[in-house]
Amino acid sequence: MIAKLDGEERALALRDLPEWAAVQEPDGIRRLFTFKDFTAAFGFMTQVALLAEKADHHPEWSNVYNRVDIILTTHDAGGLSRRDIDLAKQIDALL
Ligand SMILES: C[C@H](O)[C@H](O)[C@H]1CNC2=NC(N)=NC(=O)C2=N1
């Protein structure tokens, strides 16, 4: 069973993810991405989907034209866990 991060662990982890904001409902982190057009946004989503499958950790997300809204939270932990931090770093590395 994966554990939720405590307050200190969150603060430390978020230092490495300056573009991500903590959210409460669900308990996780969120980043909004804007691309040139839909093709670029969907290409990015395809890459994220492959990372997510590999990690067996899946985003809550939405797309409107050139924008992608990603929330990472861990359902098995009922909140933010190390898995979210690891996936966020992998997503950031795609850009
Ligand atoms: C059975 C499977 O490993 C689990 O359901 C995985 C799949 N993807 C997941 N994704 C996310 N975001 N949280 C989870 O707890 C989770 N659990």
Image (tube, rainbow, N blue to C red):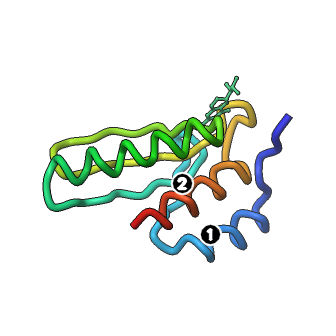
Residue furthest to the right = 1
From the image, tell me which residue sits under label 1: 14
> How far across and down, in percent of the image, does residue 45 sit?
36, 45
Estimate how packed mark 1 is, as few (under 14), some (14 to 19) or many (20 or more) residues with alpha carbons within 10 Å: some
Indicate the position of residue 58 as horizontal and vertical percent values.
55, 36
Locate the C terminus and report the quarter of the image it occupies.
bottom left
Residue located at (54% from left, 54% from top): 29
The residue pinned by badge 2 equals 29
Image quadrant for the N terminus?
Answer: top right
Q: Which mark is residue 36?
A: none
Q: For ligand 1, give the image quadrant.
A: top right
Front one among 5 and 63: 63
Q: Position of residue 66 (x, y in %)?
A: 18, 51
Q: Secondary structure at mark 1?
A: helix
Question: Are dots 2 and 1 in contact, CB under 8 Å?
Answer: yes
Give the residue type at disc 1. Leu
Mark 2 or mark 1, which has the lower sequence index?
1
Give the residue type that dot 2 points to.
Ile
Residue under the point 16% across and 47% down: 38
Q: Is 73 on the left or on the right of 13, as rendered?
A: left
Locate residue 50 relative to residue 9 in the image: left or right.
left
Q: Is residue 88 left or right of residue 80?
A: left
**Which one is in front, 6 or 17?**
17
Identified at 52% across, 52% down, the residue is 23
Q: Secondary structure at mark 2?
A: strand
Q: In this picture, is 87 found above or below 58?
A: below
* Residue at image point 55% right, 41% down: 52
Q: Dot 2 surroundings within 10 Å: few (below 14), some, or many (20 or more)? A: many
